[in-house]
Image (cartoon, rainbow, N blue to C red):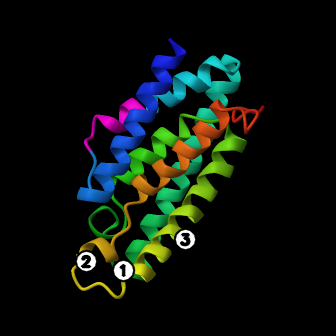
Amino acid sequence: MIILIKTILLISLLLILFQDIKQRQVWVILLPIFAIMGSVLFYYSAITVFFLYSILINLALVGFLIVINYLFAKFILKKSLFKEALGLGDVLFFIGFALSFPTFSFINFFVFSLLFSLVLQMVLKLFSKGRNQINKDAINTIPLAGYMAIFLIAVYNCHWLGFYPSIYIM
């Protein structure tokens, strides 16, 4: 059963990665699949009360970040949050991410996945400067959910292969 859940989780993350990079949009069904599979794995490795408290704290943190992003987009960038600054798929990915880990691990993985996404985008932008056939939209937008999916695939694989003892530390 656990192997099936892990397989579905990895397939959903891979599909999110490929769709977000290629089309800058993700099938909406993949995000709940990722959220459910990630939360089931977390639930099986935690006490129920700890699981529920962690999810509530993580969702509050995601909500706080979305409000900060909204205020920044509206007053500093003078843009609409979901039309120009942050994709709805990214927000749904954040929610799925929040359901998948205890608070300490969530904060750790979330911050490092954002840093990973930033560095990866900067490197790809640097290497694509000399190419004229690259789509301008592909350079100016960041497939955030896709890049974060790469990071999570690496985290899950490191954990499952025994390189990272426990991603569900309490």
Amino acid type of the residue that numbered disc 1 sits on in the rendered structure: Ser
The magenta span reads 27-34
Amino acid type of the residue that numbered disc 2 sits on in the rendered structure: Ile
Question: Which mark sits nearer the N-terminus, 2 or 1?
Answer: 1
* SS class, disc 2: loop
In 3D space, how far apart are the residues under numbered discs 3 and 1 (Cα atoms)?
14 Å
Residue found at x 59% / y 34%: 55
Position of 128 compared to 36: left or right? left
Indicate the quadrant where residue 112 lies.
bottom right
Few, some or many C-alpha atoms within 10 Å of disc 3 (few <14, some 14-19, many ≥20)? few
Which residue is the site of mark 2? Answer: 134
Q: Position of residue 9 (x, y in %)?
A: 45, 31
Secondary structure mainly formed by the magenta segment = helix
Q: Is residue 28 magenta?
A: yes
Asked whether 62 or 24 is in front, the reply is 24
Image quadrant in which the C terminus is located: top right
Asked whether 80 or 127 is in front, the reply is 127
Q: Is residue 56 magenta?
A: no
Which residue is the site of mark 3? Answer: 119
| Relative vertical location of residue 38 with respect to residue 131 in this rendering, above or below | above
In 3D space, how far apart are the residues under numbered discs 2 and 1 (Cα atoms)?
7 Å
